[in-house]
Amino acid sequence: MRVHEPEVEVTDEQLLRVHTPEHLKVVEDAYKQLNLIRRQVKIDADTVVSPGSELAAKRAAGLVVAAVDDLMSRSVEVKRAFVMVRPPGHHAEADKPQGFCLYNNVLVGVAHAQAVHGIKRVAILDFDVHHGNGDEAIAMTDRSRLYASSHQSPCYPGTGLTPGASGPHKNIWNVPLEPGAGSAEFRAAWTKTLLPAVRRFKPDAIFISAGFDAHAEDPLASVQLSDEDFSWITKEIVSTVGNGRLPIISVLEGGYNVVSLERAVRAHLEALMKA
Ligand SMILES: [Zn+2]
């Protein structure tokens, strides 16, 4: 295992592979409105920038790009990375920052892998308790990308309601889980529907929108997963989809109880390293 903290910031060129110029302008304008008196600017009800946001957001997306570059370089044996960043990204659509997310970190990484490293088919797996509407919207129009998500419904952001395949290319796979659903429902969603869809897609690389807010102790939703469930899903992704050899780039999304978040991330990391 190697840990690095490169001080890299995403470039506009990298962001513009997935976001519109108008999206970048909305976020840049919010940064510019900050001053010594105005310490917070709201883009929407729960998407706020503060003086640390610009650097944090540009590094978050930049670190996903750095992880892609690292894993794709021939000299590196390690083919799995966990990118521990905030703010999260999976709610940010091509033209809309929202839901705590300024840039779509995962899709910026996916686009970079495809544009620069010749990666053809990418599967994006999302086990955050919220539906990744941004991941889905950006992946949907491109048949070289598959998006698979389990999430609580009804819940923010109110998308991902159709179970099974959807979208013009049938490359979007959702399994909504009822509030109060637990390990059995979560594992059935992945075992019966989502993992088989990812296997059939035959990806060349896997990205994970790794949110840990489906944990029973998380305050933002009411799915009841345990630490062990995050270990289980990670092992499944690594062994049955990745065959232990595909590059896997996992990126932190939600998780709002810092005590259970630490345990769930540890379970994820241990499985990511071992499996
Ligand atoms: Zn979430």
Image (cartoon, grey):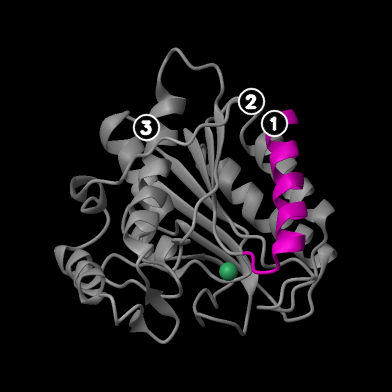
Residue ranking furthest to the top: 75
Residue type marked 2: Met
| Discs 2, 1 touching: Cβ within 8 Å | yes
Quarter of the rendering containing residue 3 = top right
Residue occupying image coordinates x 49% and y 66%: 132
Residue type marked 1: Met
Please name which of the two marks, 2 or 1, marks the residue nearer to the observer.
2
Give the quadrant of the C terminus.
Answer: top right
Is 42 part of what is drawn in magenta? no
Residue occupying image coordinates x 65% and y 49%: 195
Percent x, y of residue 221: 68, 78
Asked whether mark 3 lies closer than 8 Å to ligand 1, one says: no
Main SS, magenta region, reads: helix
- Which residue in the structure is indicated by mark 1? 273
Identify the secondary structure beneath mark 3.
Answer: loop
- Which residue in the structure is indicated by mark 2? 1
Which labelled disc corresponds to residue 38?
none
Q: CA distance from mark 3 to mark 1?
A: 22 Å
Q: Is residue 47 left or right of residue 2?
A: left
Q: CA distance from mark 3 to mark 2?
A: 24 Å
Q: Is residue 241 left or right of residue 266?
A: left
Residue type marked 3: Ile
Kindly tell me whether residue 152 is visible in this rendering: yes
Quarter of the rendering containing residue 23 = bottom left
Residues rendered magenta in the picture = 255-275
